[in-house]
Amino acid sequence: AVVSTQSTGTTNGTGEVADYTLQQLAGFNANTNFPDMGECGIPTLEETVEFAIEHDIILLFDVKGGLFCDKVSGTITDLLSRHPNFRHQFAVISFFTDILYRVRRDHPTVITGFTRRHDHIQNISRLAGYTSVWYQILMFGADKAYDFLTFYFFVPWLKIEMLEIRKDDVSEAYLRDVAPRPVLVWTVNHPLEKEYFKHLGCAVMSDIISDN
């Protein structure tokens, strides 16, 4: 199933995706944020790929969970065995360096992108309940060290082709540090923000699918 998170929170369902069968997931409405556009079930990976091929759409497979690290490479192998011409029509992006490492190791021609927000480690610790000031200060330092290792070691070493950066973290100075790699900014919904980031030479990811 192709979903935003491991939960059904972006649909009219409840609970975890893993608690349901594919047939049950297909019955949920994944289009609750845009009711005027009708209902849409949760698609399978195969349905998503076939739709992209038919309409010549480039897909970004955003792997958000480290639990799927061992499955990503095999899924890509299986996908390309059925759709060999799809190789240059998708990219794999993730917060998790181990996932990108395995993709680059097993599928060196597949485009990869590293997803980053400046407080990623701090955010994970807050969600886990570690909210003390001293702990957050420690995690702040961990984030800075992680940024340094990522941009000056990991990304160049694996030859990551693109970066997906949260909009609040992007500036002209930031772009100079990550150049010359293409940058995709998420999530950009306001028209003025879109124009600003396009002026900086960035692509944008948006939740708004209407020109209005």
Image: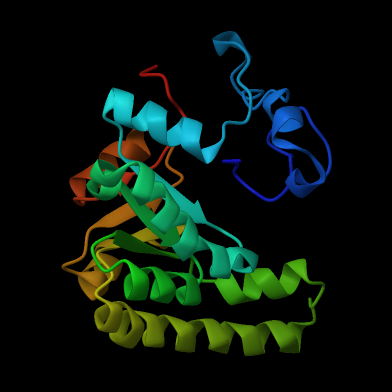
Residue 190 in view (yes/no):
no
With respect to residue 119, does 84 lie above or below? Answer: above
Q: Where is residue 31 shown, x and y percent of the image?
A: 62, 23
Q: Where is residue 211 shown, x and y percent of the image?
A: 35, 19
For the residue pair 105 and 131, the one nearer the viewer reads as 105
Q: Where is residue 58 shown, x and y percent of the image?
A: 30, 39
Residue lying farthest left?
180
Does residue 175 appear to the left or right of 25 in the view shown?
left
Q: Quadrant of residue 132?
A: bottom right
With respect to residue 131, does 139 lie above or below? Answer: below
Residue lying farthest front?
81
For the residue pair 194 and 209, the one nearer the viewer reads as 209
With respect to residue 202, does 177 lie above or below? Answer: below
Q: Where is residue 78 shown, x and y percent of the image?
A: 43, 52
The quadrant of the image that shows the C terminus is: top left
Q: Quadrant of residue 106?
A: bottom left
For the residue pair 145 and 50, the one nearer the viewer reads as 50
The quadrant of the image that shows the N terminus is: top right
Identity of the residue drawn at 79% across and 76% down:
131
Residue 58 in view (yes/no):
yes
Q: Quadrant of residue 38?
A: top right
